[in-house]
């Protein structure tokens, strides 16, 4: 399963933190630092329990843009590495990458992860990167919550990402978040699963559009709002099946149907008739889709 991806846009303020007494900051210096890095990352479930120096080589040295002496940062407690983050610039697109953030298990709960994030962001802000990105996983909800509160935004780069992020926001106790496209442009506001707004669907074609209408009966993220069909008998049949209690409106005139409050119009008429109706949808600022058959997992 693809990891969750997050971006932090330029201009987002970087909150500054103070280290607790006894802690200090250092960078990678010698081969001996590999073991401490592995201990931190193993405790943070970023590498396998039996992982050794080869994990450092794979995750750090094999990435050409990383200079360990410059980009691998540590938090130390009385000289012992207890947390780490790597922050480097991707030379291909001038974006910053926050990578392999981990705090040793026996030093958690002291705010060190937030300090590591601050270190990485300060390090990258000096480089003038376009934005900073990271990847993470659902099994690290406390880290995800920390990133969200620190200005990182969810990214829509996979078909299932919005659903996964709605669940993640629910788990983090966060009502909503701005979501970005993979190119860092604005996508939409998303909501925690219990508050997620259902997409209001309008269907043109009560016969060929039945698969979408059936889908809306059970979907958690969509509802049937309006149906249009030029044949009155088809509309009457749809009313009997999907209800005439006022929650769904029925139209024989497409222009009137288009005025209804919907987020998306599914064109389930004949393929050679899509174009003029799609143009009308665009003119009305409605998202439209040609007929397809949704499915439930």
Image (tube, rainbow, N blue to C red):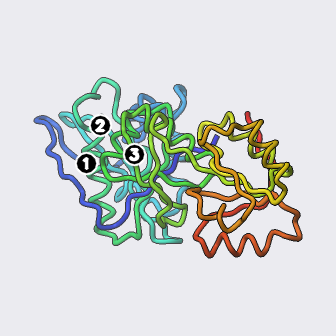
- Residue 169 x/y as whole percent: 43, 38
- Residue 42 x/y as whole percent: 46, 30
Query: For mark 3, does the 10 Å Cα neighbourhood hold few (<14), some (14 to 19), or many (20 or more) residues?
Result: some
Identify which residue is drawn at 52% across, 26% down.
49
Q: To which residue does mark 3 refer?
A: 176
Q: Secondary structure at mark 1?
A: strand
Q: What is the spatial separation of the Cα atoms under label 3 and label 2, in whole angstroms? A: 36 Å
Mark 3 vs mark 2: give the one in front: 3
Report the side of 120 relative to 4 (left or right): left
Identify which residue is drawn at 27% across, 52% down.
119
Instruction: Work out whether residue 32 can be spotted.
Output: no
Identify the image quadrant of the N terminus. top right
Q: To which residue does mark 2 refer?
A: 81
Q: What is the residue that sits farthest to the top in this orientation?
A: 106
Identify which residue is drawn at 85% across, 70% down.
273
> Looking at this view, is 193 or 283 the one in front?
283
- Residue 93 x/y as whole percent: 51, 71
Query: For mark 1, does the 10 Å Cα neighbourhood hold few (<14), some (14 to 19), or many (20 or more) residues?
Result: some
Q: Secondary structure at mark 3?
A: strand
Report the side of 223 relative to 153 (left or right): right
Query: Relative to 29, does residue 216 appear above or below in the rendering?
Result: above
Q: What is the spatial separation of the Cα atoms under label 3 and label 1, in whole angstroms? A: 36 Å
Q: To which residue does mark 1 refer?
A: 26
Between discs 2 and 1, the one toward the N terminus = 1
């Amino acid at each position: 399963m693809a990891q969750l991806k997050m971006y932090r846009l330029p201009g987002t303020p970087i909150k500054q933190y103070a280290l607790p007494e006894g802690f200090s900051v250092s960078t990678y210096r010698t081969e001996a630092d590999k073991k401490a890095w592995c201990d931190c990352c193993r405790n943070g479930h970023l590498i396998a329990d039996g992982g050794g120096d080869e994990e450092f080589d794979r995750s750090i040295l094999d990435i050409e843009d990383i200079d360990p002496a410059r980009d691998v940062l540590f938090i130390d407690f009385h000289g012992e590495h207890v947390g780490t983050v790597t922050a480097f610039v991707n030379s291909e697109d001038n974006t910053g990458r926050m990578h392999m953030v981990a705090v040793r298990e026996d030093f958690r709960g002291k705010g060190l992860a937030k300090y590591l994030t601050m270190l990485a962001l300060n390090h990258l802000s000096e480089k003038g990167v376009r934005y900073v990105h990271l990847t993470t996983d659902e099994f690290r909800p406390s880290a995800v919550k920390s990133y969200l509160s620190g200005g990182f935004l969810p990214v829509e780069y996979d078909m299932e990402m919005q659903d996964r992020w709605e669940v993640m926001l629910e788990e983090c106790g966060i009502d909503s978040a701005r979501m970005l496209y993979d190119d860092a442009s604005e996508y939409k506001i998303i909501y925690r699963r219990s508050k997620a707004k259902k997409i209001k669907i309008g269907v043109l074609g009560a016969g060929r559009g039945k698969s979408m209408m059936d889908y809306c009966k059970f979907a958690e993220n969509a509802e049937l709002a309006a149906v249009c069909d030029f044949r009155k008998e088809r509309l009457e049949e749809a009313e009997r099946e999907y209800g005439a209690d006022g929650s769904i409106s029925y139209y024989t005139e497409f222009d009137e149907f288009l005025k209804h409050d919907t987020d998306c119009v599914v064109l389930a008429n004949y393929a050679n008739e899509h174009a003029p109706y799609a143009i009308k949808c665009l003119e009305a600022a409605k998202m439209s889709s040609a007929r397809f058959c949704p499915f439930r997992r």
